[in-house]
Image (cartoon, helix red, strand yellow):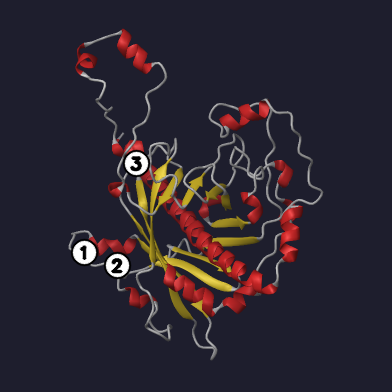
């Protein structure tokens, strides 16, 4: 797709850097493939310079029981490991240290904790936002706040600690989770639970529970219609829509006519002064991929996002949130800042927040579409098995 179409009918100046595009490669990962690793470089272009280490005692066992096969293996021979399986291990993936995002789903039996979007390549990276899913993937609630990145707020399990939230998220607070005296096999936070057992530190409960700085609600607008792939949300009084697009890149492959069914674009509606129909500005595009590990590609048009932020800076600043809970040092530093010092920081924070919203809403849509396909396939296979039987 010609990227000039992104700005057609709205940009007053054609002299815009059209090469400033960020391409994210999204992969399934984790023990049950319910995590997502997000990289700016694909698996095929990533050199594998480290292999998973053998289990403790495996080498001694091989030496003590020689056979025809291990006698042929020399000490310089590297183990045969699938590249996809090795890249699925964060310790062996060289992109882990530079990965922009990681999506983690905590496991706590009897609970349905939200996903956590992390600024980094592992599930221990600072938290950017929480992603709550409703029944049948109809609505998603994304909670943002700088407090989430502070140590201890989102604990080693991957959930908000009860000291910083309430059990059911009352009065708009974060939903917190109590620490159980015993961890069950399969639950998140194995190392964290062991560490907590050796520490007797007690954290005093806050008198006033913190609330998210911003909440974005993503809605699947019309499930039973011809526009089933449409998700809407509002951010700072601007309406955004993820929807299907028929404009795809030219290709000579035989399945090219079907690509329109797996392409979605994110548009923002810009109101006009004369009251006519709002202009559409394309901010990103997602293309799903039929593969075992890779979920798809997310293209973020950074030059368009920068243009949208600069042209609507005054309107966006009116809805800029303020942190409701902060440390004493951060509070004194905030008071010492002048208006001129706050403007660049405010713009940078708005740009980062919008980037997190684009990736977060895309991941909500990706998870919903993937899960719906899995459910549909299971139903078809069940019906086919019942009919054949």
Residue 132 x %, y %:
58, 51
Q: Quadrant of the C terminus?
A: top left
Mark 2 or 3, nearer chain start:
2
Q: Nearer the viewer, mark 2 or mark 3?
A: 2
Kind of element beneath mark 2? loop
Tell me if residue 177 can be seen.
yes
Few, some or many C-alpha atoms within 10 Å of disc 1 (few <14, some 14-19, many ≥20)? few
Q: Nearer the viewer, mark 1 or mark 3?
A: 1
Q: Nearer the viewer, residue 5 or 269?
A: 5
Q: CA distance from mark 1 to mark 3?
A: 32 Å
Residue topped by disc 1: 251
Q: Are marks 1 and 2 in contact (CB under 8 Å)?
A: yes
Residue 349 x %, y %:
58, 64
Residue topped by disc 3: 381
Residue 317 x %, y %:
63, 73
Residue 61 x %, y %:
35, 12
Q: Are marks 1 and 3 in contact (CB under 8 Å)?
A: no
The quadrant where residue 48 appears: top left
Q: Nearer the viewer, residue 164 or 278?
A: 164
Q: Nearer the viewer, residue 41 or 369?
A: 41
Few, some or many C-alpha atoms within 10 Å of disc 3 (few <14, some 14-19, many ≥20)? few
| Position of 63 relative to 320 (above/below) | above
**The furthest residue to the bottom:** 274
The residue at 74%/32% (across/down) is 201
Tag of residue 248 = 2
Q: CA distance from mark 1 to mark 2?
A: 9 Å
| Position of 180 relative to 238 (above/below) | above
Q: Quadrant of the N terminus?
A: bottom left
On the rendered structure, is 387 left or right of 157?
left
């Amino acid at each position: 797709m010609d990227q000039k179409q992104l700005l057609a009918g709205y940009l007053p100046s054609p002299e815009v850097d059209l090469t400033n595009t960020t391409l994210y490669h999204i992969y399934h990962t984790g023990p049950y493939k319910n995590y997502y690793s997000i990289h700016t470089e694909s698996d095929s272009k990533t050199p594998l310079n480290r292999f998973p280490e053998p289990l403790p005692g495996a080498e001694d066992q091989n030496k003590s029981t020689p056979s025809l096969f291990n006698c042929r293996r020399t000490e310089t021979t590297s183990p045969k490991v699938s590249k996809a399986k090795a890249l699925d291990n964060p310790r062996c993936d060289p992109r882990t240290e530079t990965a922009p995002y990681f999506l983690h789903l905590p496991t706590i039996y009897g609970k349905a904790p939200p996903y956590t979007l992390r600024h980094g390549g592992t599930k221990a990276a600072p938290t950017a936002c929480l992603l709550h899913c409703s029944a049948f993937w109809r609505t998603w609630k994304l909670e943002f706040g700088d407090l989430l990145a502070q140590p201890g707020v989102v604990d080693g399990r991957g959930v908000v600690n009860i000291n910083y939230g309430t059990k059911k998220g009352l009065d708009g607070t974060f939903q917190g989770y109590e620490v159980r005296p015993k961890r069950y096999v399969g639950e998140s936070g194995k190392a964290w639970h062991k560490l907590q057992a050796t520490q007797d530190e007690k954290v005093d409960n806050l008198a006033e529970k913190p609330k998210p700085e911003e909440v974005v609600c993503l809605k699947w607008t019309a499930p039973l219609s011809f526009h089933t792939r449409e998700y809407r949300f509002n951010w700072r009084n601007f309406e955004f829509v993820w929807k299907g697009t028929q404009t795809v890149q030219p290709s000579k492959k035989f399945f090219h006519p079907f690509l329109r069914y797996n392409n979605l674009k994110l548009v923002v509606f810009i109101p006009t002064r004369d009251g006519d129909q709002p202009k559409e500005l394309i901010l990103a595009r997602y293309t799903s991929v039929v593969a075992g590990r890779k979920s798809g590609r997310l293209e973020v048009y950074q030059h368009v996002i920068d243009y949208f932020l600069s042209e609507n800076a005054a309107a966006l600043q009116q809805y800029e949130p303020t942190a409701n809970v902060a440390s004493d040092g951060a509070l004194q530093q905030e008071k010492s800042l002048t208006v001129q010092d706050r403007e660049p920081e405010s713009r940078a924070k708005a740009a980062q927040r919008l980037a997190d919203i684009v990736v977060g809403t895309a991941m909500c849509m990706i998870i919903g579409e993937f899960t719906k396909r899995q459910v549909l396939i299971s139903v078809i296979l069940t019906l086919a098995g019942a009919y054949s039987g």
